Image: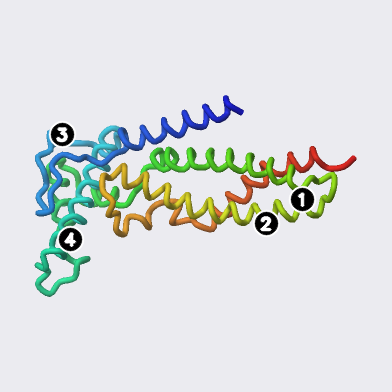
Amino acid sequence: MKIATACVLLVVLGSLVFVASAGCVRRQGRNSECIWPDDPGARTIDPSRLGDAWHLRKDVELAEELAVRHMDAEVHGRKLDGVTPTEVMNTCRDSLLKQISTSHKVPPKEVIRFFGNRSIAIDLAVIVPFLLLYCFSAVLLTRWVVRRYPPEESVSTAVTMVCFCSLVFAIGGLLLGEEWSAAAESLRVGTTHLSYRVGRLPWAHHRIGFFVLCLILFWSAAVPRLHRRQPN
């Protein structure tokens, strides 16, 4: 159990380091005036190449963060002049995306293609550690349940309690997983105001699917233990 705990913690820490370093959005040059910062990597790039696509993705994410910051500054400064906050943000974002297109000599449609396009590697680096912690906790809980309600005394009682715990645990896992995902994204982006970007997170976008997955993982931990403790 100690080895399993250590392995889970190592995976979790390693994944969080990946999210916080390799996947983080650029911090330098952030502002609320909708000004694109000097880019030392400004050059002609080819989006079909993996490294160039990664660079372009980072630029698009930075442009989106600058647009959100600009919108917040305008709202707090009450300088909207009859336009909505969303219009302010969209205008700023479109302007920044055009500058990215020009600096990298990439067609605008190629730049826009990366807008809202999440990295699968980053999402997995966030989701997998939480699921490992969830499975580890499910194993501990099922151990307690079968000790408290031994199947050899009453199979129906044990199964009923496991069903109840699986539902409660899955709901809790769904809620905690969404908070975990949002916290990791805040760390990666470097802001606590994710705005509409929360809706893009896989955990928030596929709640039913993750709820079912949490149920399956819980029962995967519970069934073997119930089977071993059943009366002969």
Q: Nearer the viewer, residue 95 or 139?
A: 139
Q: Quadrant of the N terminus?
A: top right
Q: How far across and down, in percent of the image, does residue 12 sit?
A: 45, 34
Identify the residue at image location x=13%, y=42%.
29
Which one is closest to the eye, mark 4 or mark 3? 4
Q: Which residue is mark 2?
A: 164
Q: Which residue is mark 4?
A: 71
Identify the residue at image location x=53%, y=39%.
133
Q: Amino acid at mark 1?
A: Ala
Q: Residue furthest front?
A: 148
How many marks the image carries: the answer is 4
Q: Are marks 2 and 3 in contact (CB under 8 Å)?
A: no
Q: Are marks 1 and 4 in contact (CB under 8 Å)?
A: no
Q: Which residue is mark 1?
A: 158
Give me the C-alpha separation between circle 1 and circle 4.
Answer: 55 Å
Lower sequence index among marks 2 and 3: 3
